[in-house]
Image (cartoon, rainbow, N blue to C red):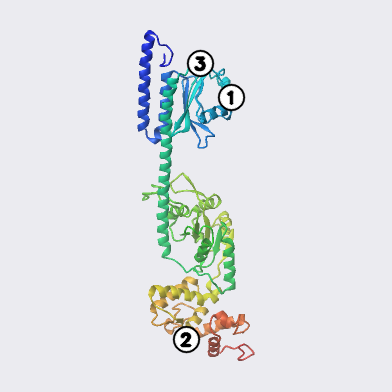
Amino acid sequence: MTPWSGDVDGMEASASVAERLAFERLLADLSTTFANAASDDVTTEIERGLTQLVTFLGYDRSTLGEFSADGSELTVIGSISRPGFEATPLGPLPAQLGWFKRELRAGRIVRFPAMPEDVPPEAVGEIEYARRTGLRSILTIPVRVGGQVMGAISFSAFSSTREWPDDLIARLRMVGEVFVQALVRSRADAVLRSAHDEIKRLNARLEAENVYLRQAAQGKLPGDLASHSPRYNEVLDDIRQVAPTSSTVLLLGETGSGKEVLARAIHELSGRNKRPMVKVNCAALPATLIEAELFGREKGAFTGSLSRQMGRFELADGATILLDEIGELPLELQPKLLRVLQNGEFERLGGTQTIKVDVRVIAASNRDLARAAQEGTFRQDLYYRLNVFPVEVPPLRERREDIPMLSWAFIQEFSDSMGKPISGIDEASMMALQAYSWPGNIRELRNLIERAMILARGPVLKISLGRGSSSSSSSTSGETPGSRDDAERSHLRRALERCGWRIRGAGGAAAVLDMKPTTLESRMKKLGLARPGLQGDSE
């Protein structure tokens, strides 16, 4: 006996009234349950509610479906059945039930007390489905939320035909609305949680970027890449060519030769320049920490790791990462770096979740990586993956034409920070700078200018190369004045020979040395320099 069995006489009528009251209590209980259900529990509660309805009403199966945003699909999100009968598979309904889905999407109830006899002939797929599954009777009610059809609740009978009274349909429609409203609410809560998690992630990333930028600003180098050196201008042309691509770049050169400046130029000329370039010095971190620094770590990954840490590759997603001193990367970490270069994937230290990133990699090294790969101290496959676009950065001694320009850039930098205006550089000092071999390259020049600026007492800067240099501008450094003259004479001779001993005009030695022709002639006379076989020929 069910509340709508159709029996209304005598005791059977009393039983029917009692069952109807019980059914009303069941509906009230379901409404209360879903009003208080947590978002994560909604699907479970829907299946529990469908089970109660099937048990109480004596049907064989009950199903709840949800329409896609465009209404093209009706996806089953919950279905239960009595023992001996199959539940409707979760997921989109079969394509053959197109008539069925169109009726529901239009807001029309699908009510067939006897199948397949009651099914209209145009519903060919539905007739075939009923015959194949043994479906005898079905009621499916479209459910609206805010006036829009959002889903449908369905009841099926396989063992016998069923009648579907209008008052029962009205009550089941209310149940369906309770279910679907809870489902919509859970979807909205999930979106809010996802948005909240994304905001937290972006805030963490922004904070990490701010920390990184504060650290990077402390070691900022001048970014003026103008040059008078033909060889260095070739390097700059290569940089301009490769910068707009996403190709990996390998910068090779001596320590202090300006590889980081070139890396920043590549980043700034690329389409990734809206986000900061991230730098990692592979030689400055202990082997035990560099994996966490590069790839991040999960909470509890090792002793003392009390929170999750975002790695530099994750921080550089959508931007550029500079792996400085890549030759010092431990062998055991090189396969993980190779995987990032090939697939853009890695896992945090202590984690199992695969993280995908889109990062442009620039590697830099003062080592001969090709030889290291041959000797087995650096992985060959990693070397070949890094060596897509190698750039040889010339040392400062091979671009002496740039020493005056670089010196003035450093003077301006320190003049602003120290409040010491400098109007010129002592000529003898500049000669000594251009004659020096610069084993420390641009970094050594910068340090030398900084020291000179600290000691400066007037508008003309005098620079001492200091102890240990191959030439000096001060006898107090342990070098003789004659050694400075010899170095200057050698430097001027090299410049004059390159220019065919031409002093004036475009391409002349004075222009190459960035000095006035009269000053060069004066220095040549003092140092006893003259074109071989043509005494006094300065043109």
Q: Looking at the image, which residue is at 58% across and 81% down? A: 495
Q: Is residue 135 something one can see in this rendering?
A: yes
Residue at (59, 58) in percent of width and height: 388
The mark nearer the N terminus, 2 or 1, is 1
Q: Which residue bears the numbered disc 2?
A: 481
Residue 379 is situated, as x and y percent measured from the top left of the image, at 55, 55
Q: Earlier in the sequence, mark 1 or mark 3?
A: 1
The N terminus - image quarter: top left
Element carrying mark 2: helix
What is the distance, in whole Å, between disc 3 and disc 2 at their CAs?
Answer: 117 Å
Q: Quadrant of residue 501?
A: bottom right
Q: Indicate the position of residue 437 as horizontal and vertical percent values.
A: 52, 76
User: What separation in Å lies between label 2 and label 1 (alpha carbons)?
Assistant: 107 Å
Q: Earlier in the sequence, mark 3 or mark 2?
A: 3
Circles 3 and 2: CB atoms closer than 8 Å: no
Q: Which residue is mark 1?
A: 123
Q: CA distance from mark 1 to mark 3?
A: 19 Å
